[in-house]
Image (tube, rainbow, N blue to C red):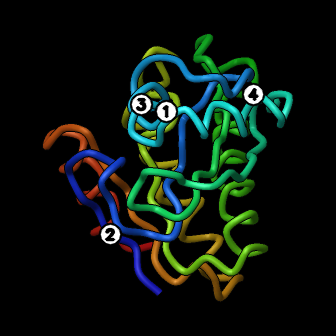
């Protein structure tokens, strides 16, 4: 079982599944969502249309199509409204829902972006803490996935995640 950090483009990672920080429609958008849809090709959009959306805090699984990853786990993170509307709990639910899908489908490696920290404005430090603690809690109880990767877009975000992983947990 391992937790690790990489800095780079999540669309090129060779893992069983990458997690898409999607919106509720699952029909693509900006940031990592748009990048995943572009890299996967139009078949991903077709499959997402058939899913009929996804509520905040939940996750849905699709094939990866033209991605290096076999699957995409789409999860909808919360929009930050100051922290008083259950944002932390909803973000933790994104990680738990995504990891549950990975376990149910026998996936051994999953890569997460920094969910909700872009246009949804979730504070990066708080989101990092939730991400790492959610992954640690999952791995204390479950056997799969064996590897959880935090894929950061910038080196400064990578440093934040590496520092959190180096803390005792």
Mark 1–mark 3 CB contact (< 8 Å): yes
- Pick whichever of labels 4 and 3 is earlier in the sequence: 3
Q: Nearer the viewer, residue 7 or 15?
A: 15
Disc 4 is placed on an element classified as loop
Q: CA distance from mark 4 to mark 2?
A: 27 Å
- Pick whichever of labels 4 and 2 is earlier in the sequence: 2
Residue 35 position in % (x across, y down):
38, 31
Q: Quadrant of residue 45?
A: top right
Q: CA distance from mark 1 to mark 4?
A: 28 Å
Crowd band around label 4 with a 10 angstrom C-alpha radius: few (<14), some (14–19), many (20+): few
Is 71 displayed left or right of 150 in the figure?
Answer: right
Nearer to us of marks 1 and 4 is 1
Q: CA distance from mark 4 to mark 3?
A: 31 Å
Circle number at residue 4? 2
Image point (62%, 11%), residue name: 81
Crowd band around label 1 with a 10 angstrom C-alpha radius: few (<14), some (14–19), many (20+): many
Q: Identify the residue position indicated by label 3 in the image.
A: 38
Residue 118 position in % (x across, y down):
41, 22
Nearer to us of marks 4 and 3 is 3
Nearer to us of marks 1 and 2 is 1
Disc 2 is placed on an element classified as strand
Image point (63%, 51%), residue name: 73
């Amino acid at each position: 079982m391992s937790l690790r950090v990489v800095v780079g483009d999540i669309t090129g990672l060779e893992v069983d599944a990458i997690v898409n920080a999607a919106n509720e429609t699952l029909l693509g958008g900006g940031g990592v969502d748009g990048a995943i849809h572009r890299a996967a090709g139009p078949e991903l959009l077709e499959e997402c249309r058939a899913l009929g959306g996804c509520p905040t805090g939940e996750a849905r699984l699709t094939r990866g199509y033209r991605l290096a990853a076999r699957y995409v786990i789409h999860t909808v993170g919360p929009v930050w409204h100051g922290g008083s509307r259950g944002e932390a709990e909803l973000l933790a639910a994104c990680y738990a829902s995504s990891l549950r899908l990975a376990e149910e489908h026998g996936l051994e490696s999953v890569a997460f972006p920094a969910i909700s920290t872009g246009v949804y404005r979730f504070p990066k430090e708080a989101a990092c803490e939730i991400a790492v603690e959610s992954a640690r809690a999952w791995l204390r109880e479950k056997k799969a996935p064996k590897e959880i990767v935090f894929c950061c877009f910038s080196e400064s975000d990578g440093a934040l995640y590496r520092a959190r992983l180096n803390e005792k947990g």
